[in-house]
Image (tube, coloured by chain):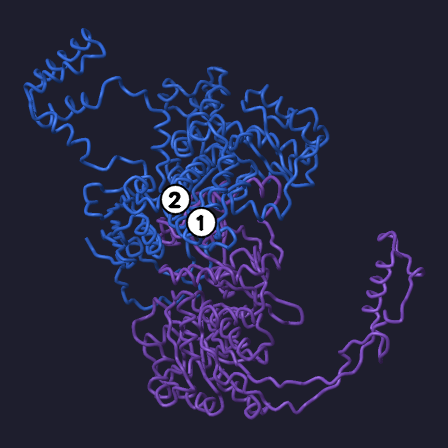
Amino acid sequence: MKSELKKIYKRLKSEGLSAERDAKIRLEVDGELTHDPPAAPYGDLPTGTDGLSPIKKLYAYHDMAVLQATSGAQSSSTNRIQTMDELLEKDKLREKDGFPRKIRVGRMIKPGKAGQGKIVVIPTTVEEKFMHDPTMKPTDDEQAGGHGEGEEGEVIGEQPIHDPQDQSGAGPGEGEGGQHEMESSAYDLGRILTEQFELPNLKEKGKKRSLTRYTYDLTDKNRGFGQVLDKKATLKQIVETNISLGNLPDMNDIDPTGFLIAPSDKIYRILSREKDYESQAMIFFLRDYSGSMAGKTTELVVAQHVLIYSWLLYQYANQVETRFILHDTSAKEVKDFYTYYNSRVAGGTQVSSAYRLVNEIVENENLRSDYNIYVFHGTDGDDWDTDGRESIPELKKILSYASRTGITIAEHSSGSSTKTEVERYLLRSELLEKMPKLIRLDVISEDADEKRLIDGIRKLISE
Amino acid sequence: MELIDQHTKKIMEGCKKRARDAGLSFQDESLEYIVTNRDLLELSPKNMIPTLYDYWVHDVEVMREKGKYELYPHNPYETVINTRPAISFYNDNNPDWLNVMIFYHVLGHIDFFQNNLYFRHTWDYDFTGEALSDKRMFTRLRAEKGRWVEYIIEFARGIDNLVGYHKELSAKHERPAPDHSKKVDFYFDIFLQKVKKIRVSEYIKEIERFNSCRREMGGMCEDSFFSDVEQNHPEFNTMFNKSLDKKPKETKDLLQFLMMNSKMLNNEKNNWMKTILQIVRKTSLFFQPQIRTKIMNEGWASYWHDTLFMKDDRIAGHEVDYARVNAGVTSMPRVGLNPYALGMRMFSYIEELAEKGKMTWDFQKIKDADERRDYDKKNGNGQDQIFKIRENLCDFTFLNTFVDQDFVTKNKLFVSGKRLNESKMVWEYYVKSRNAADYRDMLLTQLYHPPHIVIDLEKSDNGQLYLVHKFEEKPLIKDFLDNTMLGIEYLWGGPVHLETHEVVAQPTKSMPPTIPIPGVPPQRDETERKQEIQWQRVQYSMEDRKLSKKKL
């Protein structure tokens, strides 16, 4: 992979590069990053609870953990599932009373069964007080206690700069992995976004395609007679009947030979006609995972994509299919949201590769006629293809079939004040003005908060 | 939550007897509960106080990344709480020998709670009891006032880290009030010295006159003394009366100031809000000493569980099990700070100092290293000394006094640093200093320290409230100013100003990003990195729920 990068770099260099561009590209070429998803999330580094430093801080020690090995309490997943709605309802009232909202929708992706990443929604908040800013000290200067041998100046340990948690693109509140969580499906998050944060409803919603296909399936149940005996349901029914007859004196010692079985206890599955809905939306999520995307920018892009994904899921009543594409100088499709969400950043940047892959997929699978296609692309605006010579034609091709293309640029705050490459060539192509219904651009700064993200979505998807 | 069984309680009582014989002192009664995960889930947001008032934030995951421990100074998972009787929490499946160890540790904490003077204000009442009635009060208020109760709790909690804990404590240790009136103070301290500016000899004469007057007339003296004064200075009485109502009274902290002086809160229909402020303030005060004695408290408890466990005749055969657990508790991490380990070593070290008579001026004078090492007067009062220390010091004074070079060297301690190695792309941890002064500084900067914010009474007039954040080279978190000041404005009922210092953003020099060249260590421009921080005095103002900022 390295050599490939170098090849591209050489070619670009021969075509002429400004010093600044050169330096930027060199950074990505020479970086020693790989795309491997994080190994063990925290490894065996001692983890501090403030998320800033892996060293356990003075006040992070407590008796319950130290003496009794009791970590933070684990909440069961369904605990107080209704509180999210209640909290958001309260938050709405706050706004009415003239105070700013306080609840943020923290979320995290958990690897689920069958490759289905599950989105867990966690309401988070912060109690504002006058407090000293702990981030003010440069990390270079961080001091801690130490114990043991070693001369002054001697190096006693190393820690890779790019910790997994830096780049997993975790949403706020991810902190200690799954504590106090409330599970809620992405669908719920979409509902919350639409209702509570007043994201627009899609006008096209409900434009159902003709339901021409039917399938027959053994889904209905019938008591007494039918095609296939549902053994589990039948057994349950028998046990129920026997309990009510008083035929089960001891629950711990059940003797099935003594069961009385009524004919109506037998439950059968019968064939019934099922409507087979066609998916109505196909969403492509494109994410730049080049080396320059380290840190906050990735976090923002992924967080926004989770929100968009959830919102569309709700809008199309779950009739949504998603494709996930990651790109650096080349693009690849990944199988699920989890991989998409967690793959680490590395390598160089060529936006056109991702657009090309989308076009190929649409072409090969003939998706154009059957789906409302959405394409969302998140990047930091960096592109080796400075003028968009390759990206713009590919993008135009996408615009010919996609219902909406939304590009999010999360700008590095440290970067120069000039516009990023992607933004520049998009503006120059005048696509944004010519087809405002088809393509939208949202530029956010690295320190954007959740409110800004949701505003961004509104911008990307509104009519 | 259920109480521990009789068998385990018997073990606890045995521990208590042995601990008392060793010199610890604590109240007879204590309650021990078995807790499940589910219980912990409910207890931890309430800082293990089962009866603490309900508040919606308790149900929500609070953002973790930003200085959690600054925000929540008290420990969410304490095993024992400072109540009367003291309540402690245990896992269901602890083996007996482990319980013995934990019991001793817990007794160490209880002894500390009940004897350390920084806990003085918590000695005279049972917090759980009061918390329960407060909780009921909140419930009642919610029924009447609805969601506004939540807002007031929120706003009050927004400033509950500024409670005047030390002022509250020193009030507990104040000398009894003098037996003369304020009028006398005003006459001698202000009127004669600042208004009349009389000469010293005249001043002494005047004092002499007052004293002789008191000798003759006793309790009646002030009346006759001031009737003379009035003949000489007819303006005195008016000036004195004026001085009384000149300023709002001195208060201990912002919460108390608002309760006494806010027009909004003192409006009769808003009186219920003051109840909330009062409760929030009291709760905050209750938790203050915990975090300020973390190292001492854990060190003390560890010292005693270690001392007492090994002597306990009931645990024979479990020495190895114990050693494993104890090593986990009291070992020093290679990098980082373990309060248990540090505190325990400190107490042992101080005990040894006193034992050998090293806490004397004679010893301090010795410069010769060998002589210092071999110095032993066999004073034998080591334990008395550490008992005194557990009574009178807090973390700051403890570390500031006793972390010296001998201690640092003896325990092989050092300050570790962290730096970027750009060629390897790793953070390197290295031994930065083995100097005691550096180590002490490092410790002290890690201690809990809320911002020092005072009310400027001079500038607070015309319904304005003027707060000053005292400069300590630490800026406030900007994101939090808006909501916090919004709350204060609401409680105050008028514009609120905050004076503070901010770091001036350095104009980033547009130097090209350094490209690491493998094999060559990156050049560092040390002078550039260590740029002086520039501070700018600014004033934030909150008026009509709008925040504005201006430079001063």
Res. A164 in view? no
Colour seen for chain A: purple
Asked whether the beta carbons under mark 1 and mark 2 sit within 8 Å of each other, the answer is yes
Which is more toward the observer, B23 or B194?
B194
x and y percent of residue A283 in the render? Answer: 53, 81
Work out which residue is located at the far right of the displayed protein and give it: A257
- Identify the secondary structure beneath mark 1: helix
Work out which residue is located at the far top of the displayed protein and give it: B216
Residue drawn 53% across and 87% down?
A372
Left or right of B29? Residue A137 is: left
Colour seen for chain B: blue
Which is more toward the observer, B246 or B118?
B246
Q: Amino acid at mark 1?
A: Glu
Mark-to-mark CA distance, 1 and 2: 10 Å
x and y percent of residue A359 in the render? Answer: 52, 89
Letter of the chain that mark 2 sits on in the rendering: B
- Which image quadrant for residue B78? top right
x and y percent of residue A327 in the render? Answer: 50, 78
**Sequence-first tag of 1 and 2:** 1
Q: Quadrant of the C terminus of chain A?
A: bottom left
Residue drawn 47% across and 40% down?
B134
Which is more toward the observer, B475 or A451?
A451
Residue B272 tag number: 2
Residue drawn 27% across and 41% down?
B261
> Which residue has dot 1 on it?
B144
- Identify the secondary structure beneath mark 2: helix
Label 2 neighbourhood size at 10 Å, few (<14), some (14-19), many (20+)?
Answer: some
